[in-house]
Amino acid sequence: METIKYLYNTFFFIALCINFGCEKTEFPEINKEDNPITDIEGNIYGTVNIGNQRWTIDNLNVSHFRNGDPIPHAVSIAEWELAGKEGRPAWCYYNNDPNNASNYGKLYNWYTVNDPRGLEPEGWRTPSARDWSNLIDYLDGIDIAGKKLKSASGWDLNGNGDNSSKFNGLPGGGRLVNGEFANMHNAGIWWASTKNSAITSYAYNLNSSDSKVLKGIFDMATGLSVRTIYCPDCTNDTTSQLTLAEKLQKALDVTLETSTGVGVSAAVIMPDGETWVGTSGVSYGTTSITPDMMFAIGSAQKMFVGAAILQLSEEGKISLDDSLSEWLPPYPYVDSTIAIRQLLNHTSGLYNFVDYNEYWQAIFNEPTRIWTMEELFLTFNRAPLFPKGTGWHYSQTGYNMLRMVIEKITSSDIPEVNSNRFWIPLELNHSFTSKDGDLPQVFAHSWYDLNGDGSYEDFSSFPRTAFVSGIGGEIWATAEDLAKWARILFQEKKVLSQASIDQMLTFHSPCTGEEFICEGYGLGVVKFNPQLLNGHKAIGHSGNAPGYAAASMFFPDLEISIGFLDNTEEGEAIAAGIYNLLDVITSYLEK
């Protein structure tokens, strides 16, 4: 579930930059008169080459789409809020003062940026997150690029830049979802074309307090500035004659191009069982991701824990209402009357040890150490967060205890349980459970920000022993197997009886602190917030592991399943990638 969890607020920013290795060149002395471009209204914009990109040096100031249609001008708070709620394009002047346009241009919600009628001048487009990352990298990283991008005047708090890039970033502020204006002279914020979810997108911020460039997640109803980047071929329609498979592949390629990911793998199983599998990007160097490469799936493996417990319940070997005391000895900070069901749906109140910094320090300081689940639990567990059954908190601790229960009942370790109950009988031939950090034969290299500088390093040679042994095993799978698992479990119903599925899909709500992602949590299953998925209902699970992110999802209204894998821990491509695949699939099914 963590993968699609991005803290977001209207002016909450996340710093992130990936090194893409642009070749350095000297900044040209270009001004508006040297290389002007014009929009449909005749407004003139200067341009500048920065690295291998060409940017406008003025914010867009146009009130018509490229086809001539007017963009609605939302002046009042009510007009602005209504446009946002209905997902319609809108623009305004900062403080509704036309005098601000000459310096700062207009403010646009993201629905304007994304409108197919085109906001930008012909041959130009709104930059993606990848474009912004390339720019930031060329200017030597997030910590100092802001100074080079900011204008040399106009910023409060002595926050002027040196404008050595000639980008001329001005502090034009923005308009909040509620219609209020904020941060002129303190912040300049520009949209990226890259979606984060059905209701949020990325934007990039310069502020007066420092020289950084910050990446943020914004509600699409926010009003921000827009810059454009040269793209001579981007207005050509190249998709109308493509097959479904080709459109899905293009959506996957675009997802990676507009995110900061390294490599992705995805699979879609359509209602009739037809399967599409696609990959994009690299495992490492010039080695491409291939469909048979396995990725670690992180907390998506909670579905397998839930399914195993429910199978054991069907076999009469355990009851969901059994207390822990019937299966495990007493432990510090653990109420022994906690029920198995409460561990499964995260209402036990148990502390989540992965939130504890000392746990991660121990894992990284001694990566080859072999931990037992009990040893790790005794070392890092802390006082409960609330009495059992009185709240909700996501807890890996509870799932460690469930795995201990499974091993006690079956007299088998977790790799053997998964193989005997799932891999072999369900023909999930490209799934694997690592016991002590051993790796599958064919896997995608993992990428992880080891030193906190915002850049990913190849993490695949780092031992996973301490991390894997302490949770009783780590599941690896291909995207196709994750899609197959979701279909077999929820649509074909070959894993559990209907009564057990009904138990599994009895959701606790709210998922306190996770409401943006989680509408409800069942027995190892997330009921995803439909707002993330363009209104579509979905059940399944997502997860992170060091260097990887994953999702396995079933969409009941569409009768499709999706598996999606990313070989970076942040998993930025997953939310946008699933959204982009859904766009293609729903258009196809409607026809």
Image (cartoon, rainbow, N blue to C red):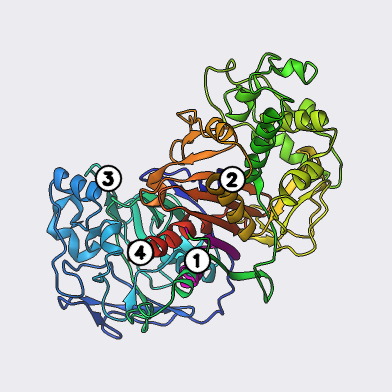
Which of label 4 and label 3 is nearer to you? 4
The tag earlier along the polypeptide, 1 or 3, is: 1
Residues in magenta?
Answer: 249-271
Measuring from the top left, give residue 339's x and y in whole percent.
64, 19
Question: Which residue in the structure is indicated by mark 4?
Answer: 587
- Could you say which quadrant of the image residue 105 lies in? bottom left
| Relative vertical location of residue 11 with respect to residue 239 in this rendering, above or below | above
Question: Which residue in the structure is indicated by mark 2?
Answer: 489
Q: Are marks 1 and 3 in contact (CB under 8 Å)?
A: no
Q: Are marks 4 and 2 in contact (CB under 8 Å)?
A: no
- CA–CA distance in space, label 4 to label 3: 29 Å
Q: Helix, strand, or loop for circle 1?
A: helix
The tag earlier along the polypeptide, 3 or 2, is: 3
CA neighbours of label 4 inside 10 A, class few (<14), some (14 to 19), many (20+): few
> Which residue occupies the foreground of this view, 202 or 548?
548
Measuring from the top left, give residue 215's x and y in whole percent.
46, 55
What amino acid type should be assigned to the residue bearing mark 2? Answer: Leu
Q: State whether residue 220 appears in this view.
A: yes
Question: Which residue in the structure is indicated by mark 3?
Answer: 177
What amino acid type should be assigned to the residue bearing mark 1? Answer: Ile
Q: Is residue 505 magenta?
A: no
Q: Is residue 253 magenta?
A: yes
CA neighbours of label 1 inside 10 A, class few (<14), some (14 to 19), many (20+): many
The tag earlier along the polypeptide, 4 or 2, is: 2
- CA–CA distance in space, label 4 to label 2: 26 Å
What amino acid type should be assigned to the residue bearing mark 3? Answer: Val
Question: Which residue in the structure is indicated by mark 1?
Answer: 136
Q: Quadrant of the N terminus?
A: top right
Going by the image, does 77 lie left or right of 48?
left
| Relative vertical location of residue 73 with respect to residue 301 in this rendering, above or below | below
Which of label 4 and label 2 is nearer to you? 2
